[in-house]
Image (spheres, rainbow, N blue to C red):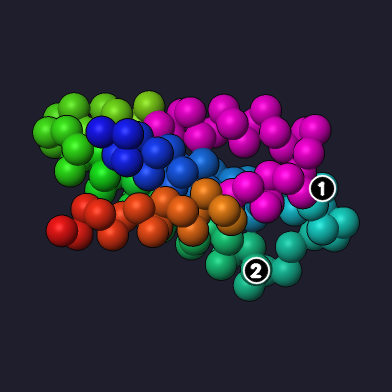
Amino acid sequence: MSTTILCALGLSYAGMASLSLAMDRHHGQVWGRDAAPNVRRALQLAGTVLLALAIWPCVAGWSASVGVVAWLGFIGAGALLVALLLPYAPRLLLRSSLLAAVAALAGLVTFLR
């Protein structure tokens, strides 16, 4: 159960961080310049894929109906974490979201068995 929660929350957080860094304003906070169009598209694609992958542990850990509701809750929690961290420590957001993505993707291996 805790693997399900941590994996879904990590993927949701990393996905929302990626989507926020695809915006010029937030990208500028981290790197000091606007995002190039190909970088923006790559960040949007990565964020979408991470958010889509976050449904997998939710549905595997709970039933489909409860898993979808939990997935929506984790997306909201990930967005809240990004919104609270981005104004105060944008570079920490980048590092922590990369760490969360790697850890959560490694945690998805447990759902393959």
> Is label 1 in a helix, a strand or a loop?
helix
The answer to whether residue 8 is magenta is: no
Name the spot of residue 1 as percent of width and height, x first: 25, 33
* Depth order, front residue of 59/44: 59
| Residue at image coords 25%, 38% | 58
Tell me the residue that label 2 is attached to. Answer: 39
- Tell me, yes or no, if residue 40 can be seen here: yes
> Is label 2 in a helix, a strand or a loop?
helix
Q: Is residue 46 above or below residue 26?
A: below
The answer to whether residue 96 is magenta is: yes
| Residue at image coords 54%, 33% | 79
Disc number placed over residue 81 in the picture, else none: none
Q: Earlier in the sequence, mark 2 or mark 1?
A: 1
Q: Is the residue marked by circle 1 packed among few (<14), some (14-19), or many (20+) residues within 10 Å?
A: some
Name the spot of residue 17 as percent of width and height, x first: 59, 46
Q: Is the residue marked by circle 2 packed among few (<14), some (14-19), or many (20+) residues within 10 Å?
A: few
Number of marks in the rendered image: 2
* Residue that lies at the very extreme toward the bottom in this rendered image: 38
Q: Is residue 60 above or below residue 107?
A: above
Tell me the residue that label 1 is attached to. Answer: 29
Q: Quadrant of residue 2?
A: top left
- Tell me, yes or no, if residue 8 can be seen here: no
Q: Which residues are magenta?
A: 74-97
Q: Is residue 9 left or right of residue 23?
A: left
* Depth order, front residue of 15/112: 112
**Amino acid under disc 1:** Gln
Name the spot of residue 47 as percent of width and height, x first: 49, 54
**Amino acid under disc 2:** Val
Q: CA distance from mark 2 to mark 1?
A: 15 Å
